[in-house]
C-alpha cells in the first residue's frame, strides 16, 4: 500500500479507541471506515457478511465503490462524502445496488458521516432488499391490476355495443315480423268480412280479430309488454281493449268471459301498473304511458 493510505489507516486506528471499536463492531448495520480515495480502511462483521469477503481481503485493498453496480456508480459519485460540504442526499441516505462476492445484487441504503480532521468517514450500509423487492412486487401488482381494469373497461364497452346491436336487431326483427303479419293475415281477414256469416257475433269476432291485429302491429303492445314484463297474456288483451275504449261488458263479450273476470283483470292491471289513486282513468293512463 502507499504511504498515504498507511497514514490514513494510522489516523483511523487512532480514532478508533477501545470504546468506539466495540460500538463499530457491534452496530446493527454493516459499517466501514473509508479514506479520501474511497479505500476501505476498516470493516465490521456485518459488512463481512454483507459482502461475503473476509476483512483481510477488504481493508486497505478495496474501494467501497467496487461494491456498487455499474449503473448506480454515477449516482453514488454525485453524492460522495468528499465534496464540500457533504451533500444532504448522502447525509440522509443514498440508495444504490450493491454486488457481493458471489454476484448477488442487494439493495442498500447508505449514509456517510465525516470524521472531523481525519480525512476519513464512517459509512453505514443497511440492506433493504426485502423492502425494495416488496415495493417492486406491489408496483408490478398495481400494473397488472391497471391492465386488468383496462381490459374490463374494454370488455364492458364491447358488451354495451353488442347489446345495442342486439336490441337494434331485435327491433328490426319485430318490425319485419309485424309487416309480414299484416301481409299474410290482413288479406284473410278482409276475405272473412265479405263472406256470408251466420250472425252478428261472428262478424263481431272478425272485427275484433282485425282490431287486435292492428293493435299488435302498433307500438302500444310492444311498449306495454316492455315496460311491464309481468303482465299475463289475458291482462295484455284486456289492457289493449280498454285502451281502445271498450267497456267492461264489451270486453267480456269480445273475450267470451264474465264481467267479474274483466274487473278482476282491471284491478290486477292497476296494481301492476302502479296506479294507486283510484281516480286515475285506466284508459288515459294506458294511452299516455304506452303510446
Image: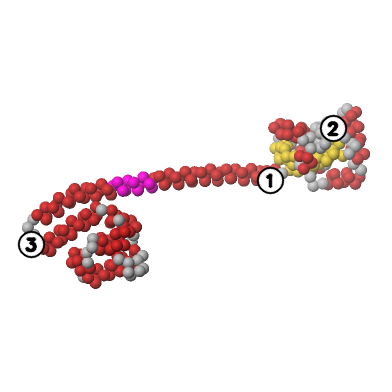
29 to the left or right of 243: right
* Quadrant in which residue 202 is drawn: bottom left
* Quadrant in which residue 2 is drawn: top right
Q: What is the secondary structure assignment of the residue under circle 2?
A: loop
Q: Which residues are magenta?
A: 163-173
The 10 Å Cα crowd at callout 2, few under 14, some 14 to 19, many 20 or more, is some
Residue 166 shown in magenta: yes
Q: CA distance from mark 2 to mark 1?
A: 32 Å
Q: Earlier in the sequence, mark 1 or mark 3?
A: 1
Q: Position of residue 7 (x, y in %)?
A: 91, 32
Q: Position of residue 44 (x, y in %)?
A: 83, 41
Q: Earlier in the sequence, mark 2 or mark 3?
A: 2
Question: Dividing the image into 4 quarters, which one contains the N terminus?
Answer: top right
Residue under numbered circle 1 = 131
200 to the left or right of 177: left
Q: Which of 214/278 is in front? A: 278
Q: Which mark is residue 198?
A: 3
Q: Is residue 55 visible?
A: no
Residue under numbered circle 2 = 36
Amino acid at each position: 500500500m502507499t504511504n498515504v493510505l498507511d497514514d490514513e489507516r494510522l489516523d483511523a486506528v487512532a480514532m478508533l479507541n477501545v470504546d468506539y471499536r466495540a460500538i463499530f463492531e457491534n452496530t446493527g448495520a454493516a459499517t466501514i471506515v473509508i479514506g479520501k480515495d474511497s479505500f476501505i480502511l476498516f470493516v465490521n462483521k456485518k459488512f463481512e457478511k454483507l459482502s461475503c469477503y473476509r476483512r483481510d481481503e477488504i481493508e486497505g485493498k478495496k474501494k467501497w465503490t467496487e461494491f456498487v453496480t455499474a449503473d448506480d456508480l454515477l449516482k453514488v459519485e454525485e453524492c460522495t462524502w468528499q465534496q464540500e460540504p457533504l451533500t444532504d442526499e448522502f447525509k440522509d441516505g443514498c440508495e444504490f445496488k450493491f454486488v457481493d462476492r458471489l454476484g448477488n445484487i442487494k439493495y442498500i441504503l447508505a449514509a456517510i458521516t465525516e470524521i472531523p480532521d481525519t480525512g476519513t468517514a464512517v459509512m453505514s450500509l443497511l440492506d433493504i432488499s426485502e423492502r425494495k423487492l416488496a415495493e417492486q412486487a406491489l408496483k408490478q401488482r398495481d400494473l397488472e391490476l391497471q391492465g386488468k381494469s383496462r381490459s374490463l373497461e374494454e370488455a364492458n364497452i364491447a358488451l354495451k355495443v353488442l347489446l345495442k346491436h342486439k336490441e337494434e336487431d331485435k327491433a328490426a326483427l319485430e318490425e319485419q315480423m309485424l309487416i309480414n303479419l299484416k301481409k299474410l293475415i290482413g288479406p284473410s281477414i278482409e276475405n272473412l268480412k265479405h263472406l256470408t256469416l251466420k250472425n252478428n257475433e261472428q262478424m263481431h269476432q272478425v272485427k275484433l280479430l282485425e282490431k287486435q291485429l292492428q293493435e299488435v302491429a302498433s307500438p302500444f303492445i310492444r311498449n306495454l309488454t316492455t315496460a311491464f314484463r309481468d303482465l299475463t297474456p289475458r291482462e295484455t288483451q284486456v289492457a289493449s281493449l280498454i285502451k281502445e275504449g271498450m267497456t267492461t261488458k264489451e270486453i267480456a263479450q269480445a273475450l267470451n268471459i264474465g264481467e267479474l273476470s274483466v274487473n278482476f283483470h282491471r284491478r290486477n292491471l292497476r296494481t301492476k301498473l302502479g296506479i294507486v289513486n283510484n281516480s286515475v282513468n285506466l284508459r288515459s293512463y294506458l294511452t299516455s304511458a304506452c303510446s
